[in-house]
Amino acid sequence: MGLPLATDLPAVEFDAAPGTPDDPIGERVASNLLRLRAKRNLSLDGLARLSGVSRTMLAQIESGRSVPSIKVLSKIAQGLKVSVAAFLDDRAFEGVAVLPARDSKRLVSGDGAFVSRALFPFDVSRQVEFYELRLKGLATEHSTGHAPGTQENLVVAQGVLEISVNEERFLLGTGDSILFYADQPHSYRNPADSEAVAYLVTTYAERLD
């Protein structure tokens, strides 16, 4: 009996590529898969049943021996009920984070007139940050400027704010917004006698670590 021809062999579909030493993506996927599976108290067999991905392949991915395709990663994500991005994040973020107001990080000026509340996990470095700003009546908050290329996008939610950028002044009422480079001296001034509230998105040119 002769050997089978290549055309007689069943087709094999490869859904994972071999891992390579010091592969940061493979290592990240592997560690996040292990963390997410352990958090849900799932065995490899249990996750295999939920995701439709074989136990063998899951073990190879979790050990870093294989890097899954997007198709396979999507199946595993569905089985674990997380975003695909959860496997690529290096900050243990699963796609949803609830931030109770009582736990928010607040930065308060020395006189207590200015309060900045972080609306994101403050202990997690990121390129974009989101803040709630509160400035008491007739108060002013100064900034010497942030890292080169930093931008600020601010919208006034309550009251009035005067924004100064390199001594050029812009008066904003409720609902007005402004976008400017914040790598230069700027300040926020409340010309009214009642509290002003604004929301600020700060975008850095590079991710802060």
Image: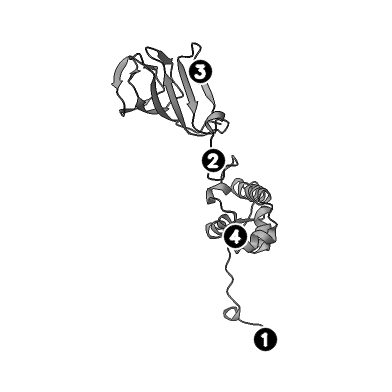
Residue 2 shows which numbered tag? 1
x 57%, y 68%: residue: 13
Q: Callout 2 environment at 10 Å: few (<14), some (14 to 19), or many (20+)?
A: few
Residue designated by label 3: 108
Of circles 2 and 4, which is in front?
2
Residue 84 is situated, as x and y percent measured from the top left of the image, at 53, 51
Determine the image quadrant of residue 65.
bottom right
Mark 2: which secondary structure?
loop
Viewer-nearest residue: 173 or 44: 173
Query: Judging from the image, what secondary structure is the residue with disc 1 in?
Result: loop
Distance CA(mark 1)–CA(mark 3): 82 Å
Residue that badge 4 annotates: 16
Ranked by sequence position, the earlier of labels 1 and 3 is 1
The residue that label 2 is drawn on is: 97
| Amino acid marked by disc 4 | Ala
Q: Are marks 3 and 2 in contact (CB under 8 Å)?
A: no
Q: Which residue type does callout 2 highlight?
A: Ala
Q: If you read the primary sequence from the N terminus, does the residue marked by circle 2 or circle 4 appear first?
A: 4
Callout 1 amino acid: Gly
